[in-house]
């Protein structure tokens, strides 16, 4: 008789700092303007957006994974449009969530994951963005 036992290993994902596109000024909204922040922290702005405070990539700690294990990362926006603290007719969209496709955990089964993305304006032709905080959700999947 042979007994085979499988133990399920589940890792944890802990948010260290959230994804932030900083504070921006939108000077033109006749076309979709955007802020592009990749996971390594490089940032670019289209011509109708200016930074007041810089953006920051999100940082997550992956723990309790097998040691020296490749983990495969994917991410997507889970919300079509942002919502704001104060009602604003114009909202943002998160058109891309930027993550590395593969990370390798260290000897303790941990890794650091950085997340960036592309934030776009509505391009509605009017500029009715208010001076308030906007939020949008995304999902991260880690497989190994």
Image (cartoon, rainbow, N blue to C red):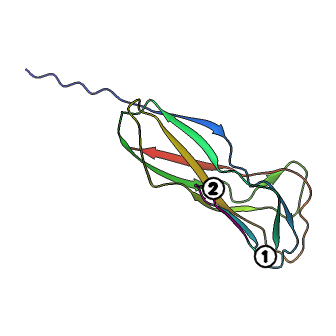
The image's mark for residue 47 is 1
Residue 71 sits in quarter: top left
Answer with left or right where residue 11 lies relative to residue 27: left
Sequence-wise first label, 1 or 2: 2
Quarter of the figure with the N terminus:
top left
Residue 6 sits in quarter: top left
Give the residue displayed 91% in from the left and 66% down from the top.
128
Give the residue displayed 87% in from the left and 48% down from the top.
85
Q: Main secondary structure of the magenta part?
A: loop
Residue placed most toward the observer, 137 or 61: 61
Could you say where residue 102 lies in the image, as x and y percent from the top left? 42, 51
Answer with left or right where residue 97 lies relative to residue 64: right
Per the image, the residue denoted by label 2 is 41
Question: Callout 1 environment at 10 Å: few (<14), some (14 to 19), or many (20+)?
Answer: few
Magenta highlight range: 38-45
Could you say where residue 125 lies in the image, as x and y percent from the top left? 86, 78
**Marks 1 and 2, how far apart at CA:** 19 Å
Could you say where residue 65 lies in the image, as x and y percent from the top left? 41, 33
Relative height, residue 89 to residue 133 (above, below): below
Give the residue displayed 54% in from the left and 53% down from the top.
75
Could you say where residue 74 lies in the image, as x and y percent from the top left? 49, 53
């Amino acid at each position: 008789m042979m007994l085979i036992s499988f133990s399920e290993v589940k890792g944890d994902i802990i948010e260290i700092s959230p994804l932030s596109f900083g504070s921006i000024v939108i000077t033109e909204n006749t076309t979709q303007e955007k802020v592009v922040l990749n996971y390594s922290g490089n940032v670019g702005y289209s011509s109708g957006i200016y930074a007041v405070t810089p953006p920051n990539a999100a940082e997550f700690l992956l723990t309790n994974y097998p040691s020296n294990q490749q983990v495969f990362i994917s991410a997507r926006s889970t919300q079509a449009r942002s919502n704001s603290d104060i009602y604003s007719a114009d909202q943002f969209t998160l058109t891309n969530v930027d993550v590395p496709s593969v990370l390798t955990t260290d000897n303790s089964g941990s890794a650091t994951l950085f997340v960036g993305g592309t934030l776009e304006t509505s391009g509605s032709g009017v500029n009715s963005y208010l001076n308030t905080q906007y939020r949008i959700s995304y999902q991260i999947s880690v497989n190994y």
